[in-house]
Amino acid sequence: MPRANIIAREHNLSRLEKHILRGTSNQYELAAAFGVSQPSISGWIKELHRRWKKESPEDTTTQRLIRVKQLDAIAVMALN
């Protein structure tokens, strides 16, 4: 996969992770927001769940909230 595609995919996964952690769960709404199909969103969600399971912190809620803050900080740095 070309580097640009990998970067775009990781960016989309980061955005999707934020949406999910903030409570958006309707895959059709997410698909519309991202301009992709519902099956694409489903696949991305499965990827996020695999990553979360791999990390498997004891307190997943706290760890996920920390992750959202980290992603927000990364987004701000990228925009600057």
Image (cartoon, rainbow, N blue to C red):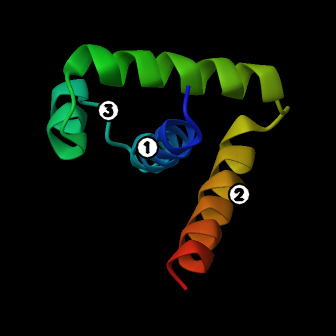
Q: Is residue 58 left or right of residue 16?
A: right
Q: Is residue 58 left or right of residue 17?
A: right
Q: Residue furthest bottom?
A: 80
At mark 3, the secondary structure is: loop
Q: Residues within 10 Å of mark 2 (few under 14, many from 20)?
A: few
Q: Earlier in the sequence, mark 1 or mark 3?
A: 1
Q: Residue 26, position in %: x, y?
A: 23, 30
Q: Quadrant of the C terminus?
A: bottom right
Between 66 and 38, the one nearer to me in the picture = 38
> Which numbered dot is residue 54?
none
Residue 66, numbered circle: 2
Residue 25 tag number: 3
Identify residue type, mark 1: Asn
Q: Residue at x 19, y 23 (%)?
A: 37
Give how far across and how far down residue 53 sits, in percent: 72, 20
Q: CA distance from mark 2 to mark 1?
A: 19 Å
The answer to whether residue 18 of the structure is visible from this angle is yes
| Res 66 quadrant in image | bottom right
Secondary structure beneath disc 2? helix
Q: Percent position (x, y) of residue 30? A: 24, 37
